[in-house]
């Protein structure tokens, strides 16, 4: 166990929230590794890097465009249902349609295309 590991049962806000404020690549890389370690602590067999990137992308989708763009760049991630904001800023209608497809099991995530 590392000194900087997350506490057991840390919330998504405690794990992914701090990443939304990171602005430097070296800090982002270190934080990404910390999150991957945390994911592997609970499930050593999972594809932790992929899961953490999807989680960063999903979490950033709740933030403003500037934050989401920065997080996508620093963590090399995308919002799993909507894709990169740099490609197309989602409208309410597009976001709703993506959610309907997702719920119906008809959509591939942007991360798995």
Image: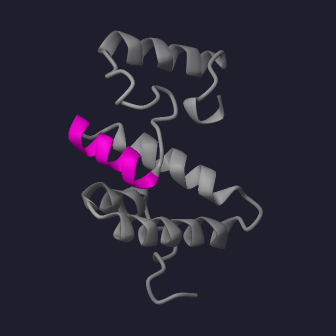
Residue 39: which quarter of the image?
bottom right
Q: Position of residue 75 (x, y in %)?
A: 44, 54
Quarter of the picture holding the N terminus: bottom right
Left or right: 86, with 82 as reference point = left
In the rendered image of this protein, does residue 96 appear above or below residue 42?
above
- Residue situated furthest right in the rendering: 45
Q: Tell me residue 61's x, y (percent).
A: 35, 37
Please tell me whether residue 70 belongs to the stretch shown in magenta. Answer: yes
Bounds of the magenta span?
Answer: 64-75
Residue 86, placed above or below residue 63:
above
Q: Is residue 104 left or right of residue 97?
A: right
Q: Quadrant of residue 44?
A: bottom right
Describe residue 14's horizontal placement relative to residue 45 as left or right: left
Kindly report the secondary structure that dominates the magenta region of the rendered protein.
helix
Q: Residue at x 49, y 48 (%)?
A: 55
Q: In the image shown, does 14 or 85 lie closer to the viewer?
A: 85
State the quadrant of the C terminus.
top right
Residue located 31% across and 41% down the image: 68
Residue drawn at x 35%, y 10% as measured from the top left: 93
């Amino acid at each position: 166990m590392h000194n900087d590991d997350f506490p057991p049962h840390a919330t998504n806000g405690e794990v992914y929230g701090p990443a939304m404020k990171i602005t430097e690549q070296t800090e982002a890389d270190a934080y990404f590794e910390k999150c991957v370690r945390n994911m592997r602590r609970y499930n050593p067999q999972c594809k932790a890097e992929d899961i953490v990137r999807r989680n960063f992308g999903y979490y950033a989708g709740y933030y403003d465009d500037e934050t989401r763009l920065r997080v996508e760049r620093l963590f090399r991630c995308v919002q799993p249902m909507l894709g990169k904001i740099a490609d197309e800023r989602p409208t309410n209608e597009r976001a709703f349609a993506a959610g309907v497809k997702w719920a119906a099991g008809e959509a591939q995530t942007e991360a798995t295309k």
